[in-house]
Amino acid sequence: MDTINHHKTPLWFWCIGAIALLWNLAGLAAFFMHLTMTPDMLAQLPEAHQALYTQAPDWLNVAFGIAVVGGTLASIMLLLKNIFAVILYSLSLLGVLAQNSYSFFMSDTFTVLGNEAMIMPILVIVISLFLMWYSLQLKCIGLLR
C-alpha cells in the first residue's frame, strides 16, 4: 500500500510569494506607465529628464519588459509551486541587469537625477538576486516541481 505524504506548505512560502508577486506587479505597472507616457506628460518633465527619456535606446524597453513580465510570471509560477519559476526569475534578473547597466554605465542618469536615484535600481537588483536564489533553494528542497 502506498503512503501519501501530505506536507503543509509553510506560511513563509506564501508570504514571500505574495510579496514577490506584489513587487513585480508594481514593476509591471511602472512599465505600463513608462510605455504610455504621452508627449504632453513628457513635456511636463524638466528638459534633462526629457532627454533621458527620449535618448534611451529601444533595447532598454525590451530589457525592462523582460524584467517585469518575467518577474511577474515567475512569481505566479512560484505560488503555483512550478519549477518554471527558476527559469523565469533567471530571465527577469537578466532583464534587470541589462536595464540597470544602461543607467549605471551608459548614460548620465545619476548626474541628472542625483546619487539618491541609485537607491531604487540597487534595490531592484538585490530583490531580483534574492528571488532567483530563493527559487533555486525551493527547487533544492523540493517545494518547486
Image (spheres, helix red, strand yellow):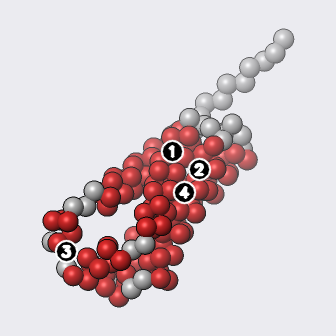
* Residue behind mark 4: 92
Left or right placement of residue 113 versus residue 60 in this view: left
Image location of residue 68, percent across then percent down? 45, 55
Residue found 56% across the figure and 35% down from its top: 80
Question: Which tag, 3 or 4, sits closer to the chain's start?
Answer: 3
Q: Quadrant of the C terminus?
A: top right
Q: Which mark is residue 45?
A: 3
Q: Are marks 4 and 2 in contact (CB under 8 Å)?
A: yes
Going by the numbered disc 4, the residue's amino acid type is: Ser
Say what secondary structure mark 1 lies in. Answer: helix
| Quarter of the image where one finds residue 132 | bottom right
Q: Are marks 2 and 1 in contact (CB under 8 Å)?
A: yes
Question: Which tag, 2 or 1, sits closer to the chain's start?
Answer: 1
Disc 4 to disc 2, how far (Cα)? 6 Å
Disc 3 to disc 1, how far (Cα)? 32 Å
Going by the numbered disc 3, the residue's amino acid type is: Leu
Question: Which tag, 2 or 3, sits closer to the chain's start?
Answer: 3
| Quarter of the image where one finds residue 109 | bottom left
* Residue behind mark 1: 73
